[in-house]
Image (spheres, rainbow, N blue to C red):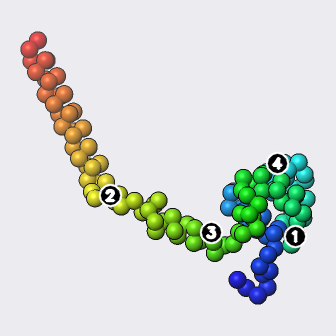
Amino acid sequence: MSATTKPYHIGRKISRIRELKDMKQEALAQALGISQQSVSAIENSENLEEEKLKEIAKALGVSVEAIKNFSEESIINYFNNIYDNGVFNTGNYCNFNPLDKVVELYERLVQAEKDKNEYLEKLLKVK
């Protein structure tokens, strides 16, 4: 963390959580029943009343503790742990070339068309 960033700036934490949830200030403002400018003011505040923090946490779908304890490092560690501990690292790796499967399917379709043509030619010869 840089020396210019305060370790406990609740507004920045709210802003970052909102951004991670792909939520615009306007959406948060609507959920809270306030203006977008008020959300901007909140995100520029170093501290907030506990009741206001509870409302914001509910609107963001997180706990008050999640906001208070939020840090970029914890998010990076969280996703690294998920990846390393098997949620994304399931060991199910593709052991074939998908392009080979496409070619195989194409060849089967071509063969089916050839078979259909042969059958139709036989029908025409019978008549």
**In x, y percent, where is residue 121?**
13, 23
Figure quadrant of the N terminus: bottom right
Earlier-in-chain disc, 4 versus 3: 4
Earlier-in-chain disc, 1 versus 3: 1
Residue under label 4, please give it. 31
Residue under the image location 21 percent in, 43 percent down: 107
Residue under label 3, please give it. 75
Q: Amino acid at mark 1?
A: Asn
Earlier-in-chain disc, 2 versus 3: 3
Mark 2 element type: loop
Furthest residue toward bottom: 3
Q: Amino acid at mark 2?
A: Cys
Residue under label 1, please give it. 47
Closer to viewer: mark 2 or mark 4: 4
Q: Amino acid at mark 3?
A: Ile
Residue under label 2, please give it. 94
